Each structure stands twice: as C-alpha cells, then as structure tokens.
Image (cartoon, rainbow, N blue to C red):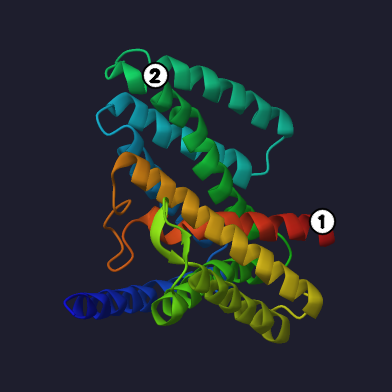
Amino acid sequence: MSDAPASRSNLTLRLLTAAVTAPLIVYLLFAGPHWGFPALTALVCALGAQELFAMVAPQHRLVRAWGILATGGIFALVAGALDPAWLLASQLLLVCGAMLVSLPRVEPMEQAALRMGWAIAGPLYLGGLFGLIARVFTVPHGGQWALLSMLFAFWSDTGGYFAGRAFGKHKLYEAVSPKKTVEGSVGGVLGALLGGLIAHFWFLPSLPLLHAIVLSIVGALAGQLGDLCESLIKRSTGVKDSGTILPGHGGILDRVDALLFSTAVVWAYVQLMT
C-alpha cells in the first residue's frame, strides 16, 4: 500500500514536467527561430553525455571531459551534414583520442578497457543519434517529422506505463528491466500507433496510412529497445536513474533513450521514402 502514494506523486511530477517542456518544444519546432530546436538538442545532448560518462567513468575526469567534448564534435558533424570524409576522419580521431585519454589513469585496471570502449562508443551513441534528431528537423516538413519521432517515443512510454500498471503480469526482460512487462510493451506500441494515426490525419497527411501504421510499430519497438539499452547501462553501473534534472522522469537519458532510437527509424524512413 505504501507504494501507491509514491506512484501517484511520481506521476504528478511527470505530468508537471511534461506540461512545462512540451509547449517549449512545440514552439521551437513550429514557431521559434530556425536555430532554436537544434540549439536545444545540442544542450540536451551535452547534458546526456555528462550523465553517461558520470555513470561509466565516475572517477576519471579526463575520460569524462573527453566524452562530453567528443560527443559534441560528433553531434556537430552529424547535425551539420558535413562531407562524409569529415565523418570518417572524426571516427579515426575518436578512436585514437579515446585510447590516449585512457592511459594516464588506469586504475582500476580490470575496468580500463571498458572505460576505453565507452570513450569511443559513447560519443557515437549520443552524438550520432542526437545529431539525427537535429538533422530530421532540417528536412522538408522537418518539424512534423521530429514531432512524429517524439510521439512514437513519449506516447509509447506513456502507453507502456499505464498498460503495465493495469495489466502487466509477464516480465519482458527481467534481467535488464525488472518492472517492464509484455503487456506494457503492447500498450506502448498502441500508444505510438495512436501518435502515428494522429500524424496521418492531422499534421502529416503526406504520410500514407499504411506507412503510418507500420512506421508506428517499428518506431515504438525501436524506442523500447533503446530504453532497454539504457537500462542495461544503468544496471551494469549500479545506477537507478541517469540523473535528477527532470522531476518524475530522472535524468535526460531516462527521458530520451527511446527517442534516440525512434528518431533513427524516422530518419531512415524519410531518407528512403521521400
């Protein structure tokens, strides 16, 4: 019984946070200055990088600093759609730099290779996928496509939350995320599907109905996989939430883990079909 008041309090905080952030995001997507949404994405990317490297390298300032700066560099390259040669060169520099910054302080030795791996993978994971969020905004009807990505991620999360609480019985992947259920996953897909249908009938009529349905399902499942991946990072590092910056949600990564993957799906669709 003691969990019920805490759950209601957490839900209230989640709703209040969404009520504050959602209007700002919609404004930047459709009415703000052209640089506003990319700038917000860059800021969120930097905060997410800080959270990630605080989890995977909590006692190694040089690795953390490198991770944040390298993430920003990859973000700029992807968001700016620079020449592929620059992307290739940046990845080679990323590998070399990550290995070098791991050398000055190697203790604990048994985790040195893991930290080195994250110094490479972390900037690609966050800088690359956040960069795609900014890139989606630059395509024709970019605000609508970016909003669709968010509906897939956030409505899937909401549908999964309520379906899991009401009907959840069968664990989805208990070793990684003990509270997630198969029923919650289905509810998440239905939430994303509602978002896809709203897009088709309201703000993105160029998206065919059948495409909206299929894209909603794929986007929701991709987002759920992104959520599980971030949960695996947290469990492996002994962290409950990636941060505390968003009341009721936890950290930045706790809020955008699904969005990073669902946006990649939307970006791939836009490139292939438009």
Task: Classify mark 1: residues with Cα within 10 Å, few (<14), some (14-19) or many (20+).
Answer: few
Horizontal and vertical percent for residue 174?
A: 42, 56
Q: Secondary structure at mark 2?
A: helix
Up/down of 16 relative to 246, above or below: below
* Residue 174 visible in rendering: yes
Sequence order check, earlier mark of 2 and 1: 2
Left or right: 200 in relation to 224: right
Looking at the rendering, in which quadrant would you find the N terminus? bottom left
Give the labeled residue for mark 1. Answer: 272
Q: Secondary structure at mark 1?
A: helix
* Residue at 35% over, 23% down: 111
Out of 215 and 110, give the one closest to the viewer.
Answer: 110
Out of 204 and 178, give the one closest to the viewer.
Answer: 178
Left or right: 109 in relation to 253: left
Horizontal and vertical percent for residue 84?
A: 72, 33
Up/down of 166 relative to 181, above or below: below
* Residue at 24% over, 29% down: 59
Give the labeled residue for mark 2. Answer: 101
Q: CA distance from mark 2 to mark 1?
A: 39 Å
Looking at the rendered structure, the number of numbered marks drawn on it comes to 2
* Residue at 49% over, 49% down: 229
Out of 5 and 167, give the one closest to the viewer.
Answer: 167
Up/down of 198 relative to 177, above or below: below
* Residue 38 visible in rendering: no
Amino acid type, residue under disc 2 in the picture: Val
Horizontal and vertical percent for residue 103?
A: 37, 13
Amino acid type, residue under disc 1 in the picture: Leu
